[in-house]
Amino acid sequence: MIDVKETLAGAEERMEMAAMFLEESLNRIRAGRANVAILDGVRVNSYGSMVPLNQVANVSCPDARTIAIKPWDKKAIRDIEKAIMDSDVGITPENNGEMIRLSLPQPTEERRRDLVKQCNKIGEKAKVEVRNVRGEIKDKLKKAIKDGLSEDNEKDAELELQKVHDKYIKKLDELLEAKNKEIMTV
């Protein structure tokens, strides 16, 4: 017989992972303000191995439209520039020999709408994952009745599962709403 509490805890953990995925993905989307998180996916070739950008340089935001990258080893400046150009960040780096600057342009209205659509697509993927978890656990609970779980326990577990599901769907909606507001604010 299955342990209902353990099963529900596992479901909640998987739903939390979907929320974390959404949050990380939204942080990488450029909303107009400088945010070092958009460079999280950039990998730099450093001494023959690919490492995250923040392991070879100091990344900071001196103002709302600029990201400054100061490499610890000045020889790595070309590799960092190349990594940024090859990534999907979409910003051309400018270097003065000591540091690299990324100037973020103000997105147009059309670009803002595209970004909102992109966010909503990612959000829908996360919601689908949360719904899939709920469906899988419901099926597990239905099968557990055959293994000896009482129907009352199964119904209680299903109600608890629905509450957890609703909580995470609401959390995902709040994350999306906040990001969309950030993108559309001029």
Image (spheres, grey):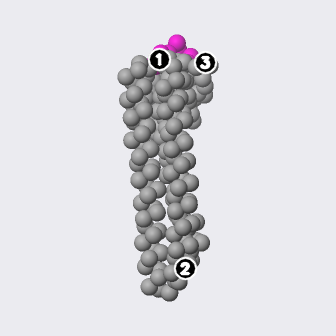
Identify residue for label 2: 152
What's drawn in magenta, residue-wise? 92-100
Badge 2 amino acid: Asp
Of badges 3 and 1, nearer the viewer stands 1
Which labelled disc corresponds to residue 106? 1
Residue 45 in which image quadrant: top left
Residue 96: in magenta span: yes
In front of the other: 75 or 139 = 139
The mark that comes first in sequence, 3 or 1, is 3
**Disc 1 secondary structure class:** loop
What predominant SS class does the magenta segment belong to? loop
Tag on residue 48?
A: none
Q: CA distance from mark 2 to mark 1?
A: 57 Å
- Circle 2 SS class: helix
The amino acid sitting under disc 1 is: Gln
Q: Is residue 118 visible?
A: yes
Mark 3 and mark 2 residues within 8 Å of each other at the beta carbon = no
Q: Of helix, strand and loop, which one carries label 3?
A: strand
| Dot 2 alpha-carbon crowd within 10 angstroms: few under 14, some 14 to 19, many 20 or more | few
Could you say where residue 2 lies in the image, as x and y percent from the top left? 53, 79
Give the amino acid type for the residue marked by disc 3 in the picture: Asp
Contact between labelled residues 1 and 2, with CB atoms less than 8 Å apart: no
**Measuring 42% from the left and 39% from the top, which residue is drawn there?**
120
Q: Is residue 170 magenta?
A: no
Q: Which residue is mark 3?
A: 63
